[in-house]
Image: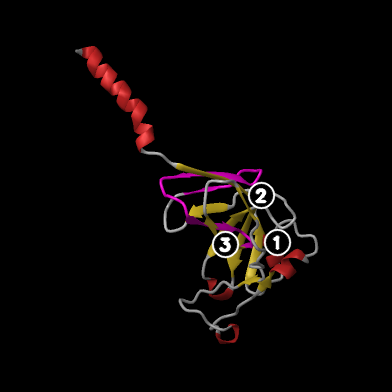
Amino acid sequence: MKSTYAQILLLLLIISPLLFAQQSLTGQVLDNEGIPLFGANIIIENSSEGTTTDENGAFQISTNRDFPFNLVVSYIGYGTQVIPVQNSSSISIFPQSDNLFDEVIISASRKAEKLQEAPSAVAVISGKSLSESSGSLTPLRSLINTPGVELQQQTGQRINVALLEDYIRTLTVED
């Protein structure tokens, strides 16, 4: 009697993977020069199934969905792309470069506003000015000449940033 239960259990264990068959998709994400993009996000559209690329830009996704479906590919500095997938053959993805790092404006307001209409002093630091910041070791040091910001070197690895306008708050930032 015990051997019958064991045989039925063994049979169920062998058959169950066949009942829940998954599709597997592999591919690689590369830039326009063919260099692998490490850490690109690949998600099956309208689902929570996804993965990231490894150091070679390679990825593998297993899903219960049937083909065709769409992959959403995103990577910092590149535009988000939707790729239609028809079958399980390996694919190569080349995201389009997108210049998203021109400038960042940080405001204490709850609504978007123009720079000229801001109620307090606002400084804009562009990516270009950061890259031209006379040999600064960290982007934090490029704040030295920003009005309303005071940097205080505490230790070799610790810098305090004080916002002097209205003394809103003091931040501690480590290199």
- x and y, in percent, of residue 68 in the image: 47, 54
Q: How many angstroms separate mark 1 from mark 3 (CA)?
A: 35 Å
Q: Is residue 152 left or right of residue 81?
A: right
Q: Is residue 135 left or right of residue 9?
A: right
Q: Which residue is mark 3?
A: 81
Q: Earlier in the sequence, mark 2 or mark 1?
A: 1
Sequence-wise, the earlier of marks 2 and 3 is: 3
Expressed as whole percent of the image width and height from the top left, the position of residue 58 reads: 61, 44
- Secondary structure of residue under mark 2: loop
User: Which span of residues is magenta-colored?
Assistant: 50-78
Q: Secondary structure at mark 3?
A: strand
Which of labels 1 and 3 is toward the front?
3
Q: Residues within 10 Å of mark 1 (few under 14, many from 20)?
A: some
Which x, y percent locates residue 31?
69, 55
Image vertical order of residue 128 relative to residue 17, above or below: below
List the residue tagged with mark 2: 157
Name the amino acid, label 3: Gln
